[in-house]
Amino acid sequence: MTDPASSLTPAMRQYMDAKKEAPPDAILLFRMGDFYELFFEDARRAAPLMDVVLTKRAGVPMCGVPYHAVQSYVARLLEAGCKVAIAEQMEDPRLAKGIVKRAITQVISAGTVLDDTVLNAGRSNFLIAVLPGKARLGVALLDVSTGDFRVTEVADRAGLETELQRLHPAECLLPETVHTRWQAEGWPDAPAPMVWTPVDDWLFDLEMARDALCRQLGVASLDGFGCRGLDVAVGAAGAVLSYVRNSLRRDASHITSLQVYQNDAYLVLDRISQRNLELVEPIFADARDATLLGVLDHTATPMGGRLLREWILRPLRDCAAIGRRLDAVEAMVRDPLLLNELRESLAAVRDLERTIVRLNVGSAGARDLLVLRHGLAAVPGLRALLGGLDAPLVRDLAAALADLPELTGLIARAIVDEPPLAIKDGGMFRPGYNADLDLLHRAAREGKDWIAQLQAKEQERTGIKSLKVRFNKVFGYYIEVTKANLGQVPADYIRKQTIVNGERFITPELKELESKVTGAEEKSKALEYELFQALREQVVAATAQVQATARALGALDVLAALADVAARNGYVRPVLTDAPVLDIRDGRHPVLDHLMRQERFVPNDTLLDVEENQLAIITGPNMAGKSTYIRQVALLVLLAQMGSFVPAKSATVGLADRIFTRVGAADDLSRGQSTFMVEMVEAANILNNATPRSLIILDEIGRGTSTFDGLSLAWAVAEYLHDHAPVKARTLFATHYHELTELALTRKGVKNYNVAVREWGEKVIFLRKILPGSTDKSYGIHVARLAGLPRAVIDRANEVLANLEGNAINEAGKPRLARSRRKAGGEEPAAQPWLFEF
Ligand SMILES: Nc1ncnc2c1ncn2[C@@H]1O[C@H](COP(=O)(O)OP(=O)(O)OP(=O)(O)O)[C@@H](O)[C@H]1O
Ligand SMILES: [Mg+2]
């Protein structure tokens, strides 16, 4: 190999310097003219990910992407889990002396991306940092795209996992040493596709963190934010802040406040329950609407959409706080006309939260100013509407709204109705906003008029009727004369170019006019750019108010959406209580109720407490509605605790601290666990963590193994839930093991229910009604017939069933399942005794 330094071109040397300055794990996109170029290992790694051709120049592997499409390529790299550093040209190449200056302007990772093409408007994009301390773990989270900045501390790894499940962060920062340790010991359970990013340990240093946070937030002490004693949380917050500043390469001026939250203020929903209950993601990807979010999302603004998602994943655990939300929803439900107007006004508001951030970080254009203007313009009307709603939460939210009339007035006077995307090409400002700009515009306009007049004047002077003044990018303005008239061209014309039909000339006068026009245009563009920056500064000064307004609008939007859903679907206000009870009359599954518009969804009651009705065992045929019913109960509790009305005639809901679910048999091959193993891991989690305040729903536990093992386990689990004092949680247990119903004979808190069906000749009619008492028929074969199994299989299954029910054991003590009423042979499938021989 040759010595690289000596053989490098100046540009390459500049590249090497930038590469040294970029984080070592980042792919560097190096701006050269109209392209971003990648070299060496970066090019090799990125070319296939970006789907561009890898080439070689002077032995150096390289690839490039056009500058105007760079965002989509960055998006692809981020999706592949990469980090990207962008090096820009820092001066106009036309004006540069020597090589153009370049510098890294931004480092983009999953947690620091601000680009709208990558971000999803409907969800927050959290960058979080975790600092394990002696007793607790500190967690800080920041949505860079909105400035939402929060800290908390959790007790242990399980607490951290709960937070990760609630937040679905994009990226998690860890001190290098912890990263190495967890890599060896195993990572906490985190929702994909989160990336773990190691950063220097010192970034988490408490003193530095405090200092940096105080400076960022403009305070002398963090105590005012409630951070006293939360040292690991503050350390984590410091790390987040310095990482973001370094990534954005500027002060993150949009981070204006910090919020401390207690994670035990929220109902805990682990990953399993989130998925089983299909809260925000359907289990089957094609069933987009079939989630609770899908049913509830009547929000009108992106802020509302993001917050609704958060409310679903973080239901509350405090009666008073839930009551405040319910009061607000109720007030809106009571006034449908007002609710309608409210939702219409909200619909005029776009993503204020992300817009103000774009303005802060300098990636905004004039259109963003209009988003701000129109959004804030809706505020006075909204405030007037909200005045008609008698609810404390609404009053507080209304008080947080700022309409900033000077600012919106300024933007209205400044920016035209349909400004261009780019801020360097002018055309953004209205006439009358700035006198200098008006003068420049006039000069350019007049210059153009003079040039137009010049054509008439020259036609007259030369007598050439077809003489034209034209413009192109290479020559600027020129005079074109056709071949036939070339003889009449005056001596003062200067020839520039010969074309097929004639020649092109310029004159000193034309060039003088031209320089007036282009000079004025250049100057006006530059001035517009300056004016834009000045206006941006003024807007940025109001960042905190805009953010507070955006958040209040988001909350109002969610409340209005909940009210709308409640009014449309006939939901009622639940009664929340601290007592561990659950009394639902005519409850409905919110999602099925919504999707099954044609056939009516059959409502059902639920009564649970920690005395006589602690454990409900639900038996019933296949397809009867057992799974639907127990999920419905969990969803109603969740709805109530997030502050929503519920689909029922009435509901009294005792606050739950957690909802546990063990539902269905989903393979988790990606985690290297078999179906049955998953089932048992989930059961263990429930038995070890449930409290008398929890709600547990169990669907068919023990099904993934042999009948006897499964029944024994199911039996023991049910007994444990009932007898074991630390658990004793309200439980719904759906099962096909009819033997379990015998538990009710010996355990006072166990009640049996079944889902009613009616037999009608050969047919079975599903009534979908939950009734007291047990059942011992499964009608599994009936369902198999409905599913279209071949007739021969159905008939044979009926025979085997009859043998079983007839207690068909032969003299040797072996089951006679293989016995067939028909003779074996012919086209009948032969009996398969080997299946049942032990
Ligand atoms: N209350 C109801 N009203 C109307 N339809 C219902 C109701 N409950 C369930 N269904 C319908 O019945 C179907 C089957 O319900 P579900 O899966 O709950 O049955 P299951 O008893 O759990 O059956 P399996 O024993 O096979 O698991 C649902 O997909 C739904 O379409
Ligand atoms: Mg089921």
Image (tube, helix red, strand yellow):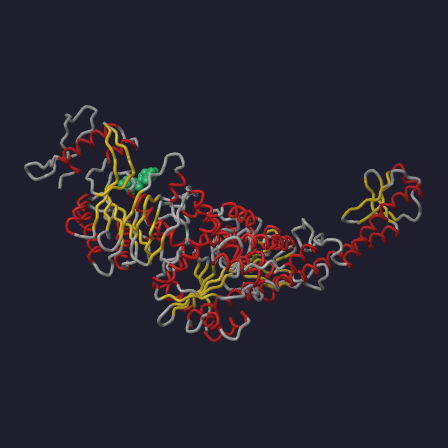
Q: Is residue 829 above or below residue 380?
A: above
Q: Position of residue 159 (x, y in %)?
A: 36, 62
The residue drawn where x is 7% and y is 40% is 813
* Residue at the farthest top position: 826
Side of 427 where 636 appears, left or right: left
Is 388 or 831 nearer to us in this picture?
388
Quadrant for the N terminus, please: bottom right
Position of the C terminus by quadrant = top left
Task: State the image coordinates of residue 739 (x, y, percent, origin top left).
Answer: 17, 45
Nearest the viewer among 534 and 297 is 297
Looking at the rendering, the quadrant in which ligand 1 lies is: top left
Is 464 above or below relative to 540? above
Q: Is residue 65 among the parts visible in the rendering? A: yes
Q: Can see residue 7?
A: no
The residue nearer to you, when weighing 828 against 713, is: 713
Observer-nearest residue: 580 or 220? 580
Q: Is residue 62 left or right of residue 324?
A: right
